[in-house]
Image (cartoon, rainbow, N blue to C red):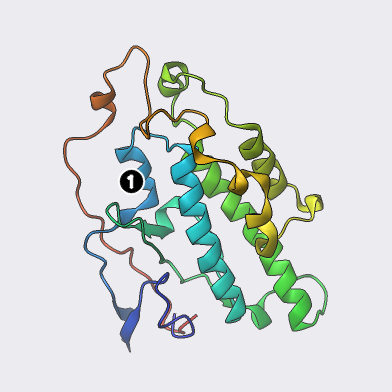
């Protein structure tokens, strides 16, 4: 986190204290932000492809910056990404398992440049989980409630490539994929920017209030 300071896409670490049996981290608290997991729940359990696309673009910028600074952010998940619902600004948290790229284990002795490529490709699996979590319904009730449930062919193709290490797609080239070039108005499941449900009052899919989520606790004082 010290390496990633001054980044708008990372929760800031202000100070830390090494105690006898635990560590204390003093971090930024983005008060209006919630986890991406909660954001999806507040939007009926699934995001439109247009919204998911904007979030993915922000995430890719964040992970590119991590790579450029020599940080491998492991274990990407919906609960470790904070998002401000008003501005759509995202911030990464949960660096307790992060490594510097020089520390990563690839099975063979490799140069830093080769390790960087390895970590970029490994990031795909986390991006796959995040994208899948954003655009796929969370329950059978939602699956059978949505109109036009299939994802666009471009989105399906990107999901396949993110999961297939033989596809050759890496973090530096993901934004060149056709899904990001598609006109937002043609995204599946999007009608005037709102998600429509059959057999359900759409308001019932939205909670009446939101509780801000605190920044998850972290236990690594090393600064990665």
Query: 74 or 221, which is in the foreground?
Result: 74
Residue 35, compared with residue 186, is above or below; it is below
Q: Which residue is rendered at x = 47% and y = 42% of the image? A: 50
The percent coordinates of residue 27 (x first, y second) are 30, 76
> Which quadrant is home to the N terminus?
bottom left
Query: 75 or 40, which is in the foreground?
Result: 40
Give the side of residue 185 with respect to residue 150, left or right: left
Residue highlighted by disc 1: 38
Residue extending farthest left = 209
Q: Which residue is rendered at x = 43% and y = 66% of the image? A: 94
Residue 150, compared with residue 6, is above or below; it is above
Give the side of residue 10 with respect to residue 177, left or right: left
Residue 71 appears in the picture as rendered: yes
Query: 32 or 19, which is in the foreground?
Result: 32
Q: Secondary structure at mark 1?
A: helix
Residue 115, compared with residue 199, is above or below; it is below
The percent coordinates of residue 65 (x first, y second) are 55, 74
Residue 22 appears in the picture as rendered: no
| Residues packed near mark 1 inside 10 Å, few (<14), some (14 to 19) or many (20 plus) | some
The percent coordinates of residue 153 (x first, y second) are 66, 32
Residue extending farthest top = 199
Q: Which residue is rendered at x = 35% and y = 31% of the image? A: 194
């Amino acid at each position: 986190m010290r390496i990633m300071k001054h980044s708008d896409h990372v929760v800031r670490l202000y100070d830390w204290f090494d105690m006898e049996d635990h560590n204390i981290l003093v971090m930024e608290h983005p008060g209006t932000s919630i986890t991406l997991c909660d954001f999806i729940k507040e939007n009926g359990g699934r995001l439109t492809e247009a919204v998911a696309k904007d979030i993915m673009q922000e995430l890719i910028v964040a992970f590119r910056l991590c790579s450029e600074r020599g940080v491998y952010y492991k274990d990407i998940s919906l609960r470790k990404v904070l998002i401000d619902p008003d501005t759509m600004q995202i911030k990464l948290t949960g660096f307790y398992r992060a490594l510097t790229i020089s520390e990563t284990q690839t099975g063979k002795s490799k140069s830093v440049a080769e390790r960087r490529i390895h970590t970029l490709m490994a990031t795909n699996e986390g991006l796959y989980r995040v994208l899948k979590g954003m655009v796929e319904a969370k329950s059978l009730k939602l699956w059978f409630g949505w109109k036009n449930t299939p994802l666009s062919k471009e989105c399906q193709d990107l999901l396949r490539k993110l999961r297939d290490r033989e596809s050759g797609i890496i973090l530096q080239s993901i934004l060149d994929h056709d899904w990001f070039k598609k006109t937002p108005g043609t995204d599946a499941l999007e009608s005037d920017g709102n998600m429509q449900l059959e057999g359900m009052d759409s308001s019932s899919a939205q909670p009446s209030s939101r509780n801000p989520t605190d920044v998850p606790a972290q236990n690594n004082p090393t600064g990665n």
